[in-house]
Image: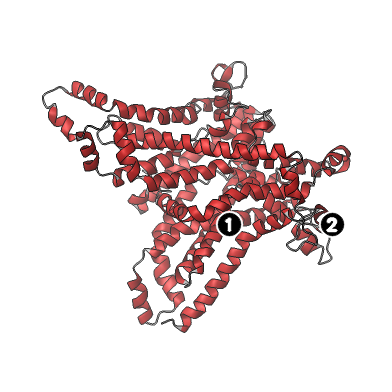
């Protein structure tokens, strides 16, 4: 690029810019399909968010439908739904963050400390659940919890002489099942970043500590965890930024869309989906959707500002 | 030399990892065994790791009677995965290459436009209305490929920074001096140097397409002939749910389902749904781990 500028030293700014644009014309053509996709997939829907303030009429389209102010939000927040989906989304995410982070760090530490080639196999095995679609995860859970044919009722509960448990109709079990499934699915994935950070630490710290007679446990709590702190803070902040979004597949497929379970399985994402496509309630779904987009955006920005305070390099922007 | 403490830790560590490994694999093993059990055994004893009677009937049924439906969905899954991944790689690479060009006018603005989509998302309602009303994507093949999956900002930015570090300016300059045009330079110089990141992104995108059920779920209303294996599995799961909800008056449904070995066939189909992933997994695993590490640095 510096060459081009050097060849045309005496021209005005405007002409230079034109010349540069012409030189880069093929590059703009390369980028065109990708940029067009972003416009279609991401930017064209954005003005459609105003729908939350309108009474949608399919014939008139989004922009010609009449304005109705905050009625849709009043309608949404008048029900218990708004509170329920916010609570479920946030509480599940907080639990997932805590449980999955603790497990991921523990697994990363164990994998870095134990000897033997078999640890490669352990790592492959625990990562595999991450590659399975949520529909199939729903089937796997069903094989265990199905009321008539499930492994747990048939092989454990009944053999103990107890009545079968109606897993898919009772809410009290689901917070545990969902937290377990989430951990099962994501620990293998989450431990990878921690493990690669751990393997980068200077072994000299550990050798020195061992010479001074530090136990393994002391080495972990006094060396490993403090060194991991920045990574833990960064990844946790990033997760907090996403706390208003949930894994749609987990909350829709695993409880098998059972109505009785909604009080403990409905999150903002499943709510928007059901309101839009199963109840055709555009008012409710657009209001809940805008609520998620806006609060989600604020949280992402906020979390990132905090990450910047801790560690500038790790911030997204 | 290993100390006594190291040995204790090893025993403890291996024990925990063996438990976790079993936990990770056991559900898939139960699914596989269930698909190989006779229907009658499961109806009698439930899903079990040690069935009384083994049977290949579920697979034979999948491949023969009424099998066209399932094999067709399997074929759709391959078609969607391959065509989607190719399209995705082409537009992602072209955009990332452009954004990596120093001196490109409006480069900062364009990069921001890409990045902003990671921060703010219009969500399902406007996206659905946009694709169905403006682009009439409902009940088309394209609805399986285009919405949300075809390109994501994260992959673009990952590839852009790879181009910036792995392809030195001097080599590009040399190509220009030799008279190569932009396209030729990209194909012959930049892309060969960036093979690792392209392979990594291809793998992530391919897995996302193979596992996707959401697009078919949202956009395929009448055209069940376009179902991928995931959509078919999802549909079958809904009919299990239906059966349970109408437990009192299921005479008709029951008759229809009595003809197919439903309990084992479902597990056979789910096994087939995982199979391609399990087959390629040993080959992509290292690359996958590297990719996660790369991505983990930024989110």
Q: Residue placed at 69% from the left, 49% from the top? A: A139
Q: Residues within 10 Å of mark 2 (few under 14, many from 20)?
A: few
Left or right of residue B28, residue A35 in this image: left
Q: Quadrant of residue B153?
A: top left
Residues marked 2 and 1, same chain = no
Q: Residue placed at 38% from the left, 34% from the top? A: B94
Q: Which mark is residue A183?
A: 1
Q: Which mark is residue B44?
A: 2
- Tell me where residue B67 appears, x and y as whole percent: 72, 40
- Tell me where residue A280 appears, x and y as whole percent: 67, 28
Is residue A98 in view from this perspective?
no
Q: Quadrant of residue B232?
A: top right
- Tell me where residue B29 appears, x and y as whole percent: 66, 59
Q: Residues within 10 Å of mark 1 (few under 14, many from 20)?
A: many
Name the front one of labels 2 and 1: 2
Indicate the chain on which mark 2 is placed.
Answer: B
- Tell me where residue A75 appears, x and y as whole percent: 64, 30
- Distance between the Cα atoms at labels 2 and 1? 32 Å
């Amino acid at each position: 690029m510096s060459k081009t500028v050097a060849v045309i030293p005496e021209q005005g700014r405007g002409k230079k810019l034109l010349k540069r644009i012409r030189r880069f014309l093929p590059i703009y053509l390369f980028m065109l399909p990708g940029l067009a996709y972003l416009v279609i997939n991401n930017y064209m829907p954005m003005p459609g968010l105003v729908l939350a303030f309108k009474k949608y009429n399919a014939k008139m389209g989004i922009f010609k439908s009449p304005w109705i102010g905050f009625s849709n939000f009043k309608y949404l927040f008048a029900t218990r739904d708004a509170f329920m989906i916010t609570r479920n989304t946030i509480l599940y995410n907080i639990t997932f963050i805590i449980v999955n982070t603790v497990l991921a760090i523990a697994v990363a530490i164990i994998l870095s400390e134990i000897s033997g080639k078999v640890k490669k196999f352990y790592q492959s095995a625990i990562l595999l659940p991450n590659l399975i679609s949520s529909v199939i995860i729903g089937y796997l859970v069903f094989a265990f919890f199905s009321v008539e044919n499930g492994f747990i009722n048939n092989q454990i509960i009944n053999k103990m002489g107890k009545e079968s448990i109606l897993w898919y109709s009772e809410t009290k079990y689901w917070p545990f099942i969902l937290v377990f499934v989430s951990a099962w699915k994501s620990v293998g994935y989450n431990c990878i970043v921690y493990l690669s950070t751990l393997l980068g630490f200077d072994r000299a710290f550990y050798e020195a500590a061992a010479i001074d007679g530090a136990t393994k446990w002391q080495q972990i709590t006094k060396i490993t965890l403090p060194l991991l702190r920045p990574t833990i803070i960064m990844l946790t902040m990033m997760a907090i930024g996403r706390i208003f979004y949930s894994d749609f597949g987990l909350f829709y497929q695993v409880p098998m869309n059972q109505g009785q379970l909604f009080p403990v399985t409905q999150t903002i994402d499943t709510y928007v989906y059901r309101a839009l496509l199963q109840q055709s309630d555009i008012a409710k779904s657009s209001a809940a959707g805008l609520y998620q987009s806006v609060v989600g955006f604020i949280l992402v920005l906020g979390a990132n500002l905090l990450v910047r305070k801790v560690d500038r390099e790790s911030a997204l922007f | 030399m290993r100390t006594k403490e190291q040995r204790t830790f090893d025993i403890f560590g291996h024990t925990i990892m063996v438990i976790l490994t079993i936990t990770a694999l056991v559900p898939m093993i139960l699914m596989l065994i269930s698909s190989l059990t006779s229907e009658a055994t499961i109806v009698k004893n439930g899903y079990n790791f040690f069935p009384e009677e083994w049977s290949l009937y579920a697979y034979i049924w999948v491949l023969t009677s009424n099998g066209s439906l399932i094999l067709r969905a399997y074929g759709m899954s391959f078609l969607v995965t391959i065509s989607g991944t190719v399209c995705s790689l082409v537009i992602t690479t072209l955009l990332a290459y452009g954004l990596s060009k120093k001196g490109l006018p409006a480069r900062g603005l364009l990069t921001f436009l890409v990045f902003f989509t990671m921060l703010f998302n219009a969500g399902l309602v406007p996206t659905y209305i946009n694709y169905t009303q403006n682009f009439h994507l409902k009940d088309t093949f394209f609805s399986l490929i285009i919405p949300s999956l075809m390109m994501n900002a994260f992959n673009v930015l990952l590839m852009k920074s790879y181009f910036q570090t792995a392809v030195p300016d001097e080599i590009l300059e040399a190509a220009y001096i030799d008279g190569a045009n932009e396209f030729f330079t990209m194909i012959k110089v930049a892309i060969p140097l960036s093979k690792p990141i392209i392979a990594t992104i291809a793998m992530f995108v391919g897995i996302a397409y193979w596992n996707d059920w959401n697009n078919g779920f949202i956009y395929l209303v009448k055209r069940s002939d376009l179902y991928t294996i995931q959509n078919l599995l999802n549909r079958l799961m809904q009919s299990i749910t239906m059966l349970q909800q109408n437990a009192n008056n299921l005479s008709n449904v029951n008759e229809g389902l009595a003809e197919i070995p439903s309990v084992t066939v479902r597990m056979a189909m789910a096994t087939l749904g995982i199979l391609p992933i399990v087959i390629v997994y040993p080959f992509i695993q290292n690359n996958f781990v590297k990719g996660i590490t790369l991505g983990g640095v930024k989110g």
